[in-house]
Amino acid sequence: MNLQYMIENYNTEDLLNAILLISADKDEALTDCRIPASEWLSANVIRQNNTALRAFTASSYEELKQTATTIFTPAIDEIFKKILESVDESDDRKQDILKSTLMKLKNLSFRGDGYQFQLMEVAERFYQPFDEDLKNAYGFSFSTCQKVIMFIYKAYMNIIFIAEETANRIAIIQSHGFKISKEMLYQKFDKTEIDRLLLYLSIIPGDTNLKAVSTNDFNPLYAKPFVDFGYYIYMPIPVSTILNLPKLFHYTFIAEKKLAQDVVDRYKENRGNVVEVLAKQYFLRLFDVVHLSLKYRQNSKTFEADITAQSDNATIFAEAKGKLLTLPALKGNLDAIKDDVYKAIGKAYEQSIRTIDHLNSEGKFIDVGGNDLTLKNTTWKFPCSIMMENFTSIPSEIYCYLDLSKDQLIPYAANIYDLDIVTRECNSSEEFVQYMLFRQMNIEKLSAMDELDFFGYFKQYGLSKINLEADEVWATSYTEEFDKKYYEITMQWLLNYKI
């Protein structure tokens, strides 16, 4: 049974309720696809407004689950078909095809950058300072939006707990158990603010402007996470809505032109400051000395080093970059990938190398208070880029993407969420330095789609050279222990979250 048949023959709300259950289903067959599948299913189901009363049964639910396990197969088959067709291409062409392929696979898979409690903290730092600006322009604040999302999410978690028993699932689907009445929201929040929030962040089922969504298209539910049925709403992709929260209002500031230019400028500055402040906070777990915004002069021009952390034998020169992956890059466009990588990592590398050269030439620095500062000229000097987004395998294969200096270390590129975990899990600055050296020793041998897989490999084997007989080794399952640990922390955070 295909999706179009189900859309035409089942109540739209039955399908939404079933998709919400699929997104949380622990069936092993859905392990790798349940969340991206639920995103794709929801985006296409809401284009309809079918009120037909065909009974949604247990077999219907199983058929929908089967659809979820197969919808990505054609896209993945096409990707690997192109790889196989490239066997006779030049090495450079093969490398380009691999870059495009890995990015497409990221776009087809679960795209979370961090754990939920991390993403919520970043979103708060990005947008809470602009609560009044958003309310004046759009009629609601970020803080209210955040609370509404969390209120619905916690309500859904209670329903999902009940749905652990298979016998309860069909009853939940048929009763439209995931609908959230507006009256319930009005009792907890200001009615006018809720109405303005839903007007801005909702999709109306059956909207003729909605287009069919393929597996690699932008999902409209990222920009508008609620579906408005009149007296009640749904939030069809709850987990992904929270994971997307740091990006939810980004284009509200950048592209919509409803906020004053000074507000937009403050937002851009704040965005970079958030990354810098968090990076300093994380590095201070390991390093006794961490500076922000050190200035220095070189060739009569003043430059700035975003984050500088020092131990007795190492200095971390990190630049903060808020660059997000663009949709063309996620679709595998090579020029877009190169442009995004340069803006997120390449520029940071150039800035870090410039600062390292300044230190090597005994250059002086000026701290944020205007005081002269002399940094130790340590044995190791690591150039780093601290980013806002997961760039898949690119940081572990950065030598394929940038023109790197032969006499400088390869840059360490990590998103702010991975830096948080790595600095939590390292026992000292010495272990962090060992990890940096491990990356230098093995960067051309070991690859990973996830920074925590690379780090997990190091935690298991220590500072050692990989001597396996293979051109390339992929670390693929080392993040599982981190996931278990931080999932428990996430659940405790959710339990303690007050609305």
Image: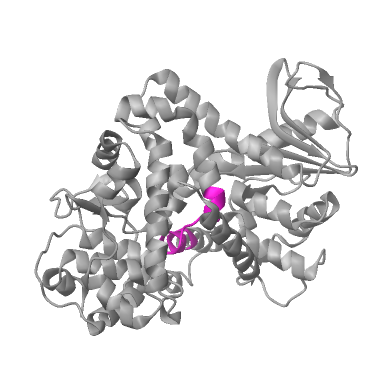
Where on the picture, by quarter, is residue 344? top right
Residue at the (58%, 50%) spot, across then down: 401
Quadrant of the rendered structure where residue 260 is?
top left
Q: In this view, does 424 lie to the left or right of 179?
A: right
Region in magenta: 102-119
State the residue at coordinates (51%, 56%).
494
Asked if residue 269 can be seen in this view, the reply is yes
Determine the residue located farthest toward the bottom in the rendered image. 59
Whether 393 is drawn above or below 15: the answer is above
Seen from the viewer's position, the closer of residues 153 and 419 is 153
Residue 147 covered by magenta stretch: no
Q: Give residue 67's quadrant in the image.
A: bottom left
Q: Where is residue 232 in the image (x, y as percent from the top left)?
A: 22, 52
Q: Position of residue 145 (x, y in %)?
A: 38, 41
**Residue 447 in view, yes or no:** no
Q: Magenta residues: mostly which secondary structure? A: helix
The colour scheme is one colour
Tell me the quadrant of the picture where the N terminus can be found.
bottom left
The answer to whether 386 is drawn above or below residue 375 in the figure is below
Q: How many labels does the image show?
A: 0
Q: Is residue 204 left or right of residue 250?
A: left
Q: Is residue 112 above or below residue 273?
A: below
